[in-house]
Image (cartoon, rainbow, N blue to C red):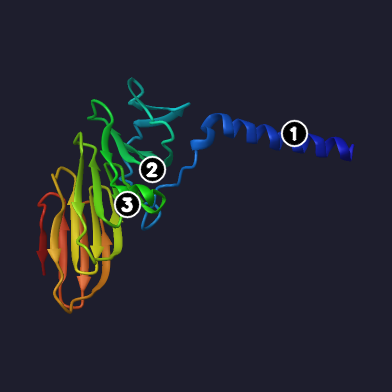
């Protein structure tokens, strides 16, 4: 009876491993979305309407259970992260970023630069119900569920990213010398330079706002206004 139990146990483990391989193949190495705090980016009222599937070497994005968008991966192209949440979904491969939303007419695509592609596994992905943000160390890449294309912002040479944050309608990246913020409906990132001796003490996010407190002032970015306001 003991031998039979062990055999059944090993058979179950083997079957699970075979099923996992069949579903994802060699490319099913996905990382979970990164959040500054668990639960950030959830509005509590938005339904998940995007599904992303990988069948052999083809991505299948399904929007609201009725619209289908297919995209073939290149030979040897590997997926390093994918996620779908609320009204937006995205895939990061070792050569490009791809996204879908309820406003999409197809996959929105943005190629990675050579150095980014070489270190694709180190790219930090962030997702909320409406926004996707990828922080590569060389630039910030964003996708808004209400738009059909990626937006991007270069990070100046010799500046180090010290923090990245997302919430329902806003996202922000803090570097050693400046603040970048972006909100739903905006066409790009809004920059605010830090003073020469100024240091960031804290960052707080709410669904529509990002608040940055330094040792000299308080700066607030609101998604609707699209600018940093100083207090």
Q: Quadrant of residue 70?
A: top left
On the image, numbered disc 2 is attached to which residue? 94
Q: Secondary structure at mark 2?
A: loop
Quadrant of the rendering where the N terminus is positioned: top right
Residue at mark 1 to residue at mark 3: CA–CA distance: 44 Å
Q: Disc 2 or disc 3, which is closer to the eye?
A: 3
Quadrant of the rendering where the C terminus is positioned: bottom left
Query: How many numbered marks have been drawn onto this rendered protein structure?
Result: 3
Q: Earlier in the sequence, mark 2 or mark 1?
A: 1
Residue at mark 2 to residue at mark 1: CA–CA distance: 35 Å
Frontmost residue, 140 versus 89: 140
| Crowd rating for badge 1 (residues with CA inside 10 Å; few <14, some 14–19, many 20+) | few
Whether 165 is drawn above or below 3: the answer is below
Is residue 41 something that shows in the picture? no
Q: Position of residue 215 (x, y in %)?
A: 20, 78
Q: Residue furthest right?
A: 1
Q: Position of residue 199 (x, y in %)?
A: 22, 75
Q: Secondary structure at mark 1?
A: helix
On the image, numbered disc 3 is attached to which residue? 115
On the image, numbered disc 1 is attached to which residue? 11
Whether 227 is drawn above or below 44: the answer is below
* Disc 2 and disc 1 in contact, CB within 8 angstroms: no
* Disc 1 and disc 3 in contact, CB within 8 angstroms: no
Residue at mark 2 to residue at mark 3: CA–CA distance: 11 Å
Q: Earlier in the sequence, mark 2 or mark 3?
A: 2
Q: Disc 2 or disc 1, which is closer to the eye?
A: 2
| Crowd rating for badge 2 (residues with CA inside 10 Å; few <14, some 14–19, many 20+) | many
């Amino acid at each position: 009876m003991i031998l039979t139990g062990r055999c059944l146990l090993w058979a179950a483990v083997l079957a699970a491993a075979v099923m996992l391989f069949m579903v994802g193949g060699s490319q099913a190495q996905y990382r979970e979305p990164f959040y500054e705090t668990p639960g950030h980016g959830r509005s509590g009222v938005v339904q998940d309407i995007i599904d992303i599937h990988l069948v052999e070497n083809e991505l299948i994005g399904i929007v609201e259970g009725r619209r289908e968008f297919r995209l073939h991966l290149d030979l040897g192209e590997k997926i390093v992260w994918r996620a779908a949440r609320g009204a937006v979904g995205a895939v990061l491969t070792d050569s490009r970023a791809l996204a879908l939303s309820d406003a999409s007419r197809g996959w929105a695509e943005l190629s990675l630069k050579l150095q980014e592609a070489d270190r694709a596994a180190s790219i930090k992905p962030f997702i909320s119900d409406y926004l996707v943000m990828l922080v590569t160390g060389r630039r910030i890449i964003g996708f808004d569920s209400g738009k059909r294309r990626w937006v991007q912002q270069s990070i100046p040479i010799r500046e180090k990213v010290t923090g990245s944050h997302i919430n329902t309608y806003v996202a922000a990246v803090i570097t050693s010398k400046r603040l970048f913020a972006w909100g739903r409906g905006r066409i790009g990132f809004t920059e605010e330079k830090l003073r020469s001796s100024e240091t960031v003490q804290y960052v707080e996010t709410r669904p529509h706002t990002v608040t940055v407190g330094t040792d000299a002032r308080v700066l607030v970015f609101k998604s609707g206004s699209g600018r940093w306001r100083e207090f």
